[in-house]
């Protein structure tokens, strides 16, 4: 009983913060999604009116498609590339710590600074089109065409994100016994084969963790869209989070914005539960 009281005492600050800044706001947003609320007047209960409007809103469905497209481009790339990068920097080479730091450095840069830097490089007269001009290749409308704008933002996201997940993979890799790799080499396994047969199976829980975290990050990404494209061109980079910002902050329609946020919350929840069930199924087999 004495230890239990002290355990709850140590847990209580974190539980209070979780309650105040996560759980209560979630239920408040769900409540607001059933109201007409513009900040200046008290919320007025309208039932499922916001959700009915949402189902008929073309901008919502476009933002829904954009969000899933962005997720599909970002999460698999980050999950796989960061693992490959972690394997490469896990070698015993001279100055390998310098390479680890270099790959991790983009994580330390502010997202706004990163967005402004890449926006300049993606400009019509920017660095990338300058290099293409040297190679006698026509300029690419990286951020000004609906067909390339989301791809460009996905590239920036992967560039900034792989260093963070590389460190997570690297910590897990260094917990694997070198004897397993030595035994695989004695059996004739090459560099990549031994990692496919040893590293990937042993790191399945970490791969699952990275997939879930990168998925949540992809669905919540907002700053890059705001700074680089402002949701354009033609709403091609307007995601659900950006639409929440537009409706809630610019249009001051908090009730409708809360409905979009609630749908986004349910989407992330369903994807996370699905990943957890999939992981449990794999563990049982």
Image (tube, helix red, strand yellow):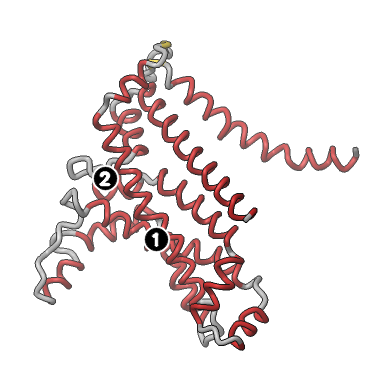
Farthest front residue in view? 285
Residue at screen point 46% across, 67% down? 104
Q: Which residue is mark 1?
A: 77
Residue shown at the point (48%, 24%) measured from the top left: 30
Percent of width and height locating residue 184: 60, 82
- Quarter of the rendering containing residue 50: top left
Image x and y of residue 15, in percent: 67, 36
Q: If the image is split into quadrants, where does the C terminus sit?
A: bottom right
Q: Residue 201 in the image: state x and y as whole percent.
A: 58, 66
Which mark is first along the chain, 2 or 1? Answer: 1
The local crowd at label 1, few if under 14, some if 14 to 19, many if 20 or more residues have their Cα within 10 Å, is many
Q: Quadrant of the N terminus?
A: top right
Residue at the image point whose x is 23% and y is 52% from the top = 149
Mark 1–mark 2 Cα distance, whole angstroms, equals: 19 Å
For mark 2, what is the residue? 237
Position of 78 relative to 99 (above/below): above
Residue 195 to residue 231: above or below: below
Whether residue 67 sits left or right of residue 273 in the image: it is left
* Residue farthest to the right, as pictured: 1
């Amino acid at each position: 009983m004495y230890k239990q009281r002290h355990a709850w005492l140590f847990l209580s600050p974190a539980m209070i913060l979780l309650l105040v800044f996560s759980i209560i706001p979630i239920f408040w947003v769900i409540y607001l999604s059933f109201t007409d609320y513009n900040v200046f007047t008290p919320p007025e209960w309208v039932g499922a009116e916001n959700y009915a409007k949402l189902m008929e809103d073309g901008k919502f469905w476009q933002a829904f498609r954009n969000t899933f497209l962005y997720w599909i481009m970002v999460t698999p790339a980050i999950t796989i590339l960061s693992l490959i990068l972690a394997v490469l920097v896990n070698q015993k080479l001279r100055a390998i710590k310098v390479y680890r730091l270099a790959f991790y450095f983009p994580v330390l840069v502010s997202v706004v600074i990163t967005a402004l830097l890449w926006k300049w490089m993606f400009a019509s007269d920017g660095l990338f089109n300058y290099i293409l001009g040297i190679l006698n290749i026509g300029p690419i409308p990286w951020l000004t065409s609906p067909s390339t704008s989301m791809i460009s933002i996905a590239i920036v996201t992967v560039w900034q994100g792989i260093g963070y997940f590389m460190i997570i993979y690297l910590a897990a890799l260094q917990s694997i016994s070198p004897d397993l790799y030595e035994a695989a080499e004695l059996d004739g396994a090459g560099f990549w084969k031994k990692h496919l047969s040893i590293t990937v199976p042993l790191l399945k829980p970490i791969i699952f963790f990275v997939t879930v975290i990168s998925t949540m990050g992809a669905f919540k990404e907002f700053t890059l869209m705001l700074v680089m494209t402002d949701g354009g061109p033609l709403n091609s980079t307007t995601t659900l989070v950006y639409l929440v910002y537009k409706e809630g902050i610019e249009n001051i329609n908090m009730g409708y914005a809360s409905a979009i946020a609630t749908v986004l919350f349910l989407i992330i929840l369903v994807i996370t539960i699905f990943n957890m069930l999939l992981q449990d199924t794999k563990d049982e087999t």
